[in-house]
């Protein structure tokens, strides 16, 4: 576990991820979703790192992640997975 700005979390590709909240000003709200069950958290973080860097941020706080079930109307013959991975948080500078 790493620490930055008094928050505990970890670095991924140069961006600090923390599930904790802080008073830093939000540069951009960030979210990533992949409509496949066999997608990894590392891949979700990779997508979020790109967004955080483009916003000029060095950290993502209030980080939440997991899997969500698709709505019944989203299930088609072309969508075999019933869940999707998601990640969300606030891009900030610590």
Image (spheres, rainbow, N blue to C red):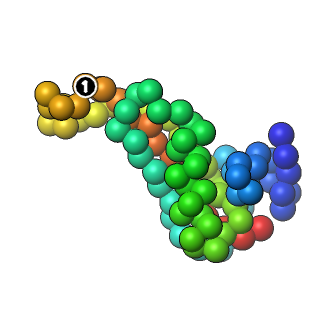
Would residue 73 appear left or right of 25 to someone viewing this image?
left
Q: Is residue 30 above or below residue 38?
A: below
At x 66%, y 56%, the residue is: 61
Q: Please state which of residues 91 and 37 is positioned toward the viewer in this rendering.
A: 37
Q: Quadrant of the C terminus?
A: bottom right
Residue 35: x and y, percent?
Answer: 35, 38
Would residue 81 appear left or right of 60 to someone viewing this image?
left
Residue 22: x and y, percent?
Answer: 71, 61
Counting other residues with Cα less than 10 Å from the Cα at mark 1, is it few (<14), some (14-19), or many (20 or more)?
few
Residue 87: x and y, percent?
Answer: 51, 46
Asked where in the image residue 15 lies, by quadrant, the reply is: bottom right
At x 84%, y 61%, the residue is: 5
Residue 46: x and y, percent?
Answer: 58, 49
Would residue 42 appear left or right of 76 to someone viewing this image?
right
At x 30%, y 26%, the residue is: 81
The number of numbered discs placed on residues in the rendered structure image is 1
Q: Quadrant of the N terminus?
A: top right
Please give the residue where the numbered disc 1 appears in the rendered image. 80
At x 35%, y 29%, the residue is: 83
Q: Please state which of residues 89 and 35 is positioned toward the viewer in this rendering.
A: 35
* Residue 74 visible at all: yes
* Residue 21 visible at all: no
Q: Is residue 80 above or below residue 19?
A: above
Asked where in the image residue 57 lies, by quadrant, the reply is: bottom right
Label 1 residue SS: loop
């Amino acid at each position: 576990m790493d620490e930055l700005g008094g928050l505990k979390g970890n670095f991924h590709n140069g961006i600090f991820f923390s599930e904790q909240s802080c008073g830093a000003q939000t540069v951009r709200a960030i979210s990533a979703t992949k409509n496949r069950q066999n997608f990894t958290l590392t891949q979700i973080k990779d997508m979020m790192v790109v967004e955080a860097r483009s916003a000029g941020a060095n950290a993502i706080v209030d980080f939440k992640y997991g899997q969500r079930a698709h709505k019944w109307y989203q299930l088609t013959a072309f969508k075999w997975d019933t869940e999707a991975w998601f990640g969300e948080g606030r891009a900030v500078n610590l």
